[in-house]
Amino acid sequence: MRIFKFGGASVKDAAGVRNVCKVLNTIGYENTGIVVSAMGKTTNALEEIIERYLSEDTTYVDLISHLYEEHMEVIGALEQPSNDQESDFSVRFRESGIKKDIKYIIESLTEELLRNKSKSYSFLYDQVVSHGELMSTKIVAAYLNECGIPLQWKDAREFIKTDNKYRDAAVKWKESEKLVKKKCGAQLFITQGFIGSDDNGFTTTLGREGSDYTAAILAYCLDADSVTIWKDVPGVLNADPRAFQNTVLLQKIPYNEAIELAFYGASVIHPKTLQPLQGKKIPLYVKSFLLPEDEGTVITDAATIDPFIPCYIVRKNMVFMKISSRDFSFIGENNISDIFQELSEHKMQVGLLQNSAISFSLCVEDKYNKLKELLADLESRYKISHVTGVSLYTVRHYNEDAMEFIEAGKEVLLKQRAQETLQLIVKE
Ligand code: ADP
Ligand code: ASP
Ligand code: MG
């Protein structure tokens, strides 16, 4: 088996869905498990629906209608046969029942919200956002089937089993492995990234951008030969091309290096993706969905990154905090443990830390909007200053030129150098 993953960008519209078909016809699709994310920005739209619903803003129903229309538009465009398709394609695609399927998914979303009695934001979040992946996989499956690619549509919640930590669920590996082997082995199938289910059958999600991770989970459970994630970039570059010019393709990356890059924030790969693959030495290919025959990047147990050049990562909108004791006493192990306990409880992701005798500096990402709460809790025991909206730059394998380049024209609040990694907190 091998696993392919198509992300939101690759299926953002009808042209994207058609291109998935082209990629499969070019590369082949025997014994392939295909993981698909929600189309384009659907997950963000579903998040907005939850926000409005919870603030009792009834216009959330308009957003649901809009989402419905958007998906129907994609189906409408797919109905038009392209030049190389038979003339009865439109009729067959129409008769596949896909419009009914999408209508049903949208109705179940609306009912879910009307019925909801839960006060838990995270629980509701997972029940709602999962509808994006359900819709995209239905559309892609219907289209590919009509194009003569006979794949089975599968509901990932039947085999990706997790705990009930909604929005950031942890996989139950043994249970999932058994189910994945039973339900997905040795066949061509399509399923949703990002979603799973808990012991009570409620939907869970694996964290934003978690579809890459789903691909890795399936590969692990099926002892797959490889995973390929199809992207709008030629592979993993030495920097995000949206933030840097003149980026260079990394042809080979060792697992550990890829884990480091993902950890520091290279958003091209979800950080949890590598670990299950590394355990079984399953190679991860990152390739362009526009140039599927190009080599792209392979992440394997290679000895070193190739080419060996500086890699740049920037995480924007971070918070820089300086914490010191109220009485100028040392910041000791007890304080550090106490501070980390608070960070963990408030789901802050730490990107950098540095301590001196009397202070402790941190750069954190406030993913869940909990900064106010965290500060309120810590301020009873510590003196804290903080700056929001800073950027954290990381350079792996830096050299003199890279240091000069990254610092040029920036207001640096803190700089930290380790053997392989340079980090700067910058006021933007
Ligand atoms: P999808 O969700 O469609 O799978 P993503 O948008 O999550 O894809 O990832 C692709 C994007 O990742 C690219 O468009 C690029 O801007 C960004 N990116 C960030 N860092 C890198 C990097 N080092 N190399 C390539 N792309 C990167
Ligand atoms: N649709 C989800 C998200 O946008 C998962 C993913 O795309 O990987 O976060
Ligand atoms: Mg993504």
Image: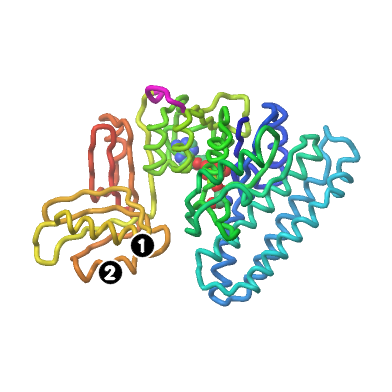
Residue at horizontal 66 percent and vertical 70 percent from the top = 61
Residue at horizontal 34 percent and vertical 68 percent from the top = 372
In this rendering, would 125 be left or right of 247? right
Which label was assigned to residue 346? 1
Confirm or deny contact between disc 1 and disc 2 (CB under 8 A): yes
Per the model, the C-alpha gap separating discs 1 and 2 is 10 Å
Q: Is residue 312 visible?
A: yes
The span shown in magenta is 300-307
* Coordinates of residue 74 in the picture (x, y in percent): 74, 50
Q: Is residue 305 magenta?
A: yes
Amino acid marked by disc 2: Asp
- Disc 2: which residue: 377
Amino acid marked by disc 1: His
Residue 105 sits above or below residue 395 on the image: below
Q: Is residue 281 magenta?
A: no
Residue at horizontal 55 percent and vertical 56 percent from the top = 198
Q: Please tell me in which quadrant of the rendered image residue 5 appears.
A: top right
Q: Earlier in the sequence, mark 1 or mark 2?
A: 1
